[in-house]
Amino acid sequence: MKKSAFYDVHCHLMNLSHPAFVSIIESMRHRPREVIYSQIVSFDYLAASVLKRGGETVRNLLAVMDNDCADILFLLEDDLDGQFEAPKGTPPFREAAPLRDGALHVAGQEFASLVLTPLVMDFMAPSSYFFNTYYRRTPQKPIEAQINDVMFAIHGYRERRPGGILRVYPFLGVNTKNYTLEGLAAYLEKWFAGYTRDEGELERRFFATSGGASPDVASDAFTRAPQDYGLFAGIKFYPPLGFDPWPDDPAERKKVEFLYAFAESKGIPITTHCDDQGYRIVSLEEALMYTAPARYGPALKKYPNLVLNFAHMGKRHIRTIGGKEQADWREDILDFVMEYPHVYTDFSFTAGEPSFYGELSALLGRLGPREAEKVSRRIMYGSDFMVNLFKVRSYRDYLENFSQSALDTDLKMLFCNENPHRFLFGGGG
């Protein structure tokens, strides 16, 4: 049976021009002991990334990020089509490409399309440290430039591959600290003025970004302003860049509450970063405090109908000084899932090792029948592409790990089809 779509609810469409590299370098340079503490615990994959085979992992990541954003979409689709196989003379990783016969084949099922929700990150917050360089001016990373790149990539993809399998519905990066209340209101209104949770309407708008639109859609070949296309499907939070989900400062709290009220009233889904690694420009202490699911407790209590996805299933990578693993934030997420009707979690990046799926099965097996049923309906597939290339060789490998895992087929379909569809577009359950 051909399903309507396979959903990847957590990925990125960024190139080397988007991140604020100098800010993170300065942040690391001024906090060396903190950096050593937080990163040495992940030495297993960091060492493999930097040292193994001449830094092959990092070079592989850069081979993606050095592209125009449209070319990243082409690269991803070509990967699914089997165009990046192992060198001649080595055993094939798989028998057939996932993308064939005009459909995506995963876990014995056929999907008519692959829905990507690239998360636009707001890198605009400057480093709080003095740049000890000749050119001391803080680099400007306006989020509008990244948005324009993503929208132009969608246009380019539709122009050159009108029959392509991808559907691309971005999430808008928001950090309330970067705006006044009035500026925040204008920013949200600008990008969500035409927001709709209707999947058919969003797909129609996606097709209309180019002359390759479906026959019943008039297209102006991307002559309108990017915001006029109404393609944003959600909002992205990234606490390690300084976003505080529930600030103590009254003025900051007012902005955050405005944002939650706006999202709740329109049903706009939100994805927030929720592991203890990643790009960070604030102190580790602040990043952990802002990222912890508990920080969202007051927000969910006041706005119980928020559609909120805790990414990475709350994985904790940082170990204690003695080398012990710290308790994951997963239990807090599961408590929210049981209490609130629209709290979700995705396993992006966390599923970089095939063993994750056994851990997930064990987790569901420890729950009672009612709890397991509810939790299984709130878990979503996410890749964290291209960041996940620190863990896997390719987008296709990550997908194959999911497809070939021992998870029950019905669970797989919940994670990659039914649950994300409900997260993005609403519906029962």
Image (cartoon, rainbow, N blue to C red):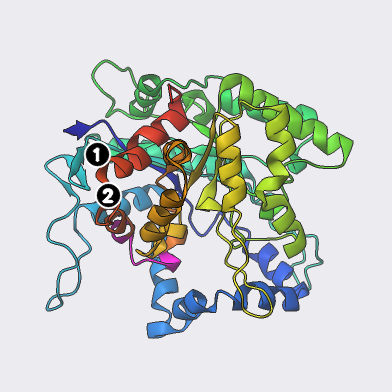
The residue lying at 63 percent from left, 49 percent from top is 238
User: Does 346 sit above or below residue 170?
Assistant: below
* Rendered location of residue 421, percent (x, y): 39, 31
What residue range appears in magenta? 389-397
Mark 2 — residue? Answer: 77
Mark 1 — residue? Answer: 164
The image quarter in which residue 193 lies: top right
Q: Are there few (<14), some (14-19), or many (20+) residues within 10 Å of tag 1?
A: some
User: Does 218 sit above or below residue 258?
Assistant: above
The type of residue carrying mark 1 is Gly
* SS at mark 1 in the image: loop
Q: Let me know if residue 222 is in the magenta part.
A: no
- 177 with respect to 193 (left or right): right
Q: Quadrant of the N terminus?
A: top left
Q: Nearer the viewer, residue 363 or 420?
A: 363
Instruction: Of the two numbered discs 2 and 1 on the same chain, state the one appearing first in sequence.
Output: 2
Q: Quadrant of the C terminus?
A: top left
Dot 2 and dot 1 residues touching (CB under 8 Å):
yes
Tell me the CA gap for discs 2 and 1: 8 Å
The residue lying at 74 percent from left, 78 percent from top is 33
The type of residue carrying mark 2 is Glu
Q: Are there few (<14), some (14-19), or many (20+) residues within 10 Å of tag 2?
A: some
* Rendered location of residue 256, percent (x, y): 74, 34
* Rendered location of residue 78, percent (x, y): 24, 53
Q: Is residue 43 visible?
A: yes
